[in-house]
Amino acid sequence: MTAHTCKAWVLPIDDSLHTAIGEGEIAHVLPGLHPLQLLPRCPTWCRNVFRWHDRVVPLFDLAALLRPQGVAVDSQAIAVVAYPGPDNSVHYGGLKLSALPFGRRVSDEQQCDFPASSPHWERIASSCFEDPLHGPIPVLDLARVFAIESTHWV
């Protein structure tokens, strides 16, 4: 019997850090040189917003969140993602990427533990799968990612 699979978008965060989201969660991919507006006094992982389709969208830098002492990575792309808000309306956010997203077929048999690279995966991801090329890839819960408050992230 063949396993049921679903499509995931793998998001390269830096050279060794990848995460994934569901197939229908990417609304658009923008070039990394898209104009950004700096927000003063915000945490390093959410310092910018950008305009997209007459909306102001927050840009989230997962590398800065998960590896605060790491080297900053230039953004090669921005994934505009869609997720349900607390009122069940569609909300949008941006994720800073080091390369373009790519698709993978994923099955339940690939489920694995979160990578040891960060103790915070359980706070922002709903599951994890083993990728043959990149190892464990956490699947983001976008509503949790964009609900993080800096005072609760220690």
Image: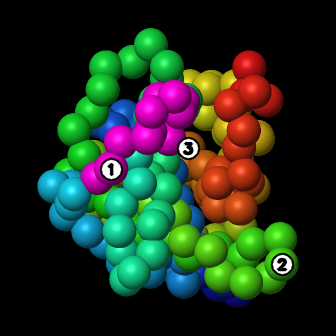
60 vs 154, left or right, is left
Q: Residues within 10 Å of mark 1 (few under 14, many from 20)?
A: few
> N-terminal of the two: label 2 or label 3?
2
Q: Can you identify the residue that label 1 sits on? A: 37
Amino acid at pointer 2: Asp
Instruction: Between label 2 and label 3, give the one nearer the viewer.
Output: 2
Q: Can you identify the residue that label 3 sits on? A: 136
| SS for dot 1 | strand
| SS for dot 3 | strand
Looking at the image, the residue that sits furthest to the right is: 87
- Near-viewer residue (22 or 151): 151
Whether 23 is drawn above or below 137: the answer is: below
Q: Can you identify the residue that label 2 sits on? A: 87
Real-space CA distance between mark 2 and mark 3, rounded to the nearest whole angstrom? 32 Å
Q: Which residues are magenta?
A: 36-47
Whether 34 is drawn above or below 9: the answer is: above
Quadrant the N terminus occupies: bottom right
Residue 105: image location, x then y, percent? 49, 74
